[in-house]
Amino acid sequence: MNIAALKKTARQVRIDIINMLQATGTGHPGGALSMVELLTVLYFEKMNINPREPKWQDRDRFILSKGHAAPGLYAILAARGFFPKSELSTLRKFKSILQGHPDMKVTPGVDMSSGSLGQGLSVANGMALSGKLDHKGYRVYVLLGDGELQEGQVWESVMSAAHYKLDNLTVFVDCNGLQINGSNEEVMGVQPVAGKFAAFGWNVLEIDGHNMPDIAEAIDAAMACKEKPTVIVAKTVKGKGVSFMENQVSWHGAVPNQEQTAQAIAELERGLGI
């Protein structure tokens, strides 16, 4: 694994996120920036995918359950070659293939439409169970926000995945601690996340969600685990890589102006904090 190359990719993905949002004037930077390393390792190192065949039946699947963080997914898909990077500037525009939330019908590389929080893991369970029944070797990955864990449907899905022993399923929880109205603990406490999943019978791993070797090692451990689904509880920083956005709930759904965009890109190009 070429860590230097992966870090360079992640840095450019963050720059693309900032440029996308500034160009369209709307979107969610905080949670898009916090998940960049997770998606970079997945899409460039671990997932069995073919950008030339987005609907290849034996591909690994990925669901971004916290669909409002779509700019992060779009930047990764463009970097991986699913569509030209020029499409990024059309984010949220009329007839664009890049809508405000992922749309599997129009965006190459999107395996499931998402955005209504709490639903992604239910769909991932169905994909994983289908793979088992059809004797397919693909794996299913889903990324949840930690605030999203406040949705009851998530825990029904957690219970189901353990019951059906979906060891071809891996969940990432992007634990950046913040959601639209404040910190998780202020709105509705979700901790202990690891303990809750363990109580439901999952294989539980806890990592630094910005440490690429740790991410890769955790994915390998998930692939090696049998008879249990795996959750990777990733401690992250909302707004990671941009000093004035980091750990600031106000940047959940705000967009930088031109001056802020210039500062953010300058910091990212210098690699400050990442």
Image: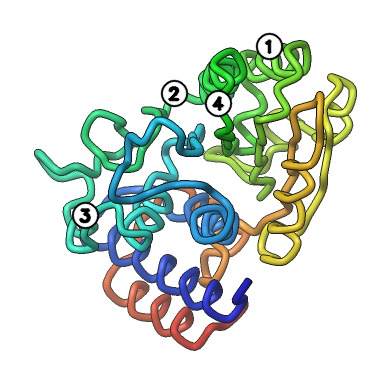
The C terminus lies in quadrant: bottom right
Amino acid identity at mark 1: Glu
The N terminus lies in quadrant: bottom right
Amino acid identity at mark 2: Ser
In the rendered structure, the answer to whether residue 93 lies left or right of residue 195 reads left
Amino acid identity at mark 3: Thr
Residue at mark 3 to residue at mark 4: CA–CA distance: 40 Å
Please rate how many residues cluster around mark 3, counting C-alpha atoms within 10 Å: few if below 14, some from 14 to 19, many from 20: some
x%, y% of residue 213?
Answer: 72, 66
Please rate how many residues cluster around mark 2, counting C-alpha atoms within 10 Å: few if below 14, some from 14 to 19, many from 20: few
Residue at 42% across / 29% down in the picture?
115
Q: Which residue is mark 4?
A: 136
Residue at mark 2 to residue at mark 4: CA–CA distance: 28 Å
Q: Which mark is residue 116?
A: 2
Q: Which mark is residue 24?
A: 3
Amino acid identity at mark 4: Lys
**Earlier residue among tags 2 and 1:** 2
Q: Which mark is residue 156?
A: 1
x%, y% of residue 74?
Answer: 35, 51
**Earlier residue among tags 2 and 4:** 2
As displayed, is residue 43 above or below residue 204? Answer: below
Mark 1, secondary structure of its residue: helix
Front position in the image: 69 or 259:
69
Residue at mark 2 to residue at mark 1: CA–CA distance: 16 Å
Mark 3 vs mark 4: in front? 4
Mark 2 vs mark 1: in front? 1
Specify the farthest residue to the bottom.
270
Mark 4, secondary structure of its residue: loop
